[in-house]
Amino acid sequence: MSFQPVSMHSVRSSNQRTLVEHWNMLSVGRRFPSIEDFNPQARDHTPEQLIIWDVEGSGSQRQFRVRRMGLRAAEALGSGPIGRTMEELVPPALREISLQGAHECAATGSAIYAIISTVANGNLVDCERLLLPFGRNGDTVEHIIAALQLISFQGAVERQEVSRDFETRSQMTFAGKIPSDWGARNPLVTVAAPALSPERVPAMAPEPVAVAAAPAGPPPADKRQAARRKVLKTGKIHFGKSREVCTVRDLSSTGASIELARQINVPDYFTLVLEMESAARKCTVVWRNGLQLGIQFG
């Protein structure tokens, strides 16, 4: 498996893109930061889907052992994962894919972003996996934080059924590595980090949903039926055979405003799937403004 150099903009999920941007910001003066500096809550990220792996050994003898695990990640891997290795936890069909990504992360000090796809009940489902390296000296990777994002494109799916489908018929559809800005400019140079306080591992308790600034509101013709909250989430819109990425700027029970990633002709009717959700919403366009659309659900 070849991990091609890619940019942070290749990360589709806004949650994961926020994490890799935070990791990159902490990497000033070194290839990667210390785990003591990492604080997902500071970036309004809910760590339910995060796994912290301790990196033990090096080269072909390297192992990855679970230190902490968020609630949703624990649901995916089963009970009693703490202290077990990646070889012990990951199903055989996914073991090689998982270990290759972890070894690449530990060996290069780069963030690893991969997409693993399967088909569940006739629906295409992606598991987006982000691996972030950490170490106190900016040279040796001591910990890896993994973030998992499950997205169903065509409808609701049962998590347990999807897990079985990934174990029996999955394939890697994207594999990239993202060096930090400093690491990309200085690939052969290492800088010793200053002495740090005793190691602090990020908490895994759920945190409040992020609230982010949104662009100017929709035209006055948009008559909202329910109060909306400002968000910043990645979504996928589907019409015909097309699938397009969008950013959801605000959201309510009856509708949303979204921003397209590129200029395309979008019909008045399509379906929308939000990150961290499996159900598709039927949408009707009620206003348009360049790349921005106001939509009503139902």
Image (cartoon, grey):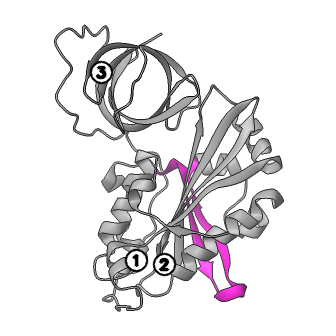
Q: Is residue 143 something one can see in this rendering? A: yes
Q: Where residue 222 sits: x, y (%)? A: 24, 11
Quick check: 288 left or right of 207?
left
Marking on residue 109: 2
159 vs 270: above or below: below
Cβ atoms at labels 2 and 1 below 8 Å apart: yes
Marking on residue 32: 1
Magenta residues, start to end? 47-71
143 vs 205: above or below: below
Question: In the rendered structure, which disc, 3 or 2, sits on the residue that comes first in sequence?
Answer: 2
Q: Quadrant of residue 25?
A: bottom left
Question: In the rendered structure, which disc, 1 or 3, sits on the residue that comes first in sequence?
Answer: 1
Number of other residues with Cα within 10 Å of mark 3, as a class: few under 14, some 14 to 19, many 20 or more: some
Residue at the image position 67 percent from the left and 71 percent from the top = 100
92 vs 200: above or below: above
| Cα gap from disc 3 to disc 2, whole angstroms | 41 Å
Marking on residue 228: 3
Residue at the image position 59 percent from the left and 32 percent from the top = 153
Q: From the image, which quarter does the N terminus lie in?
A: bottom right
Quick check: 73 left or right of 97?
left
260 vs 68: above or below: above
Q: Quadrant of residue 245?
A: top left
Residue at the image position 82 percent from the left and 60 percent from the top = 92
Q: Amino acid at mark 2?
A: Gly
Quick check: 290 left or right of 121?
left
Marking on residue 108: none
Q: Amino acid at mark 1?
A: Phe
For mark 3, give the secondary structure.
Answer: loop
| Residue 18 vs residue 183, the one in the foreground | 183
Q: Amino acid at mark 3?
A: Arg
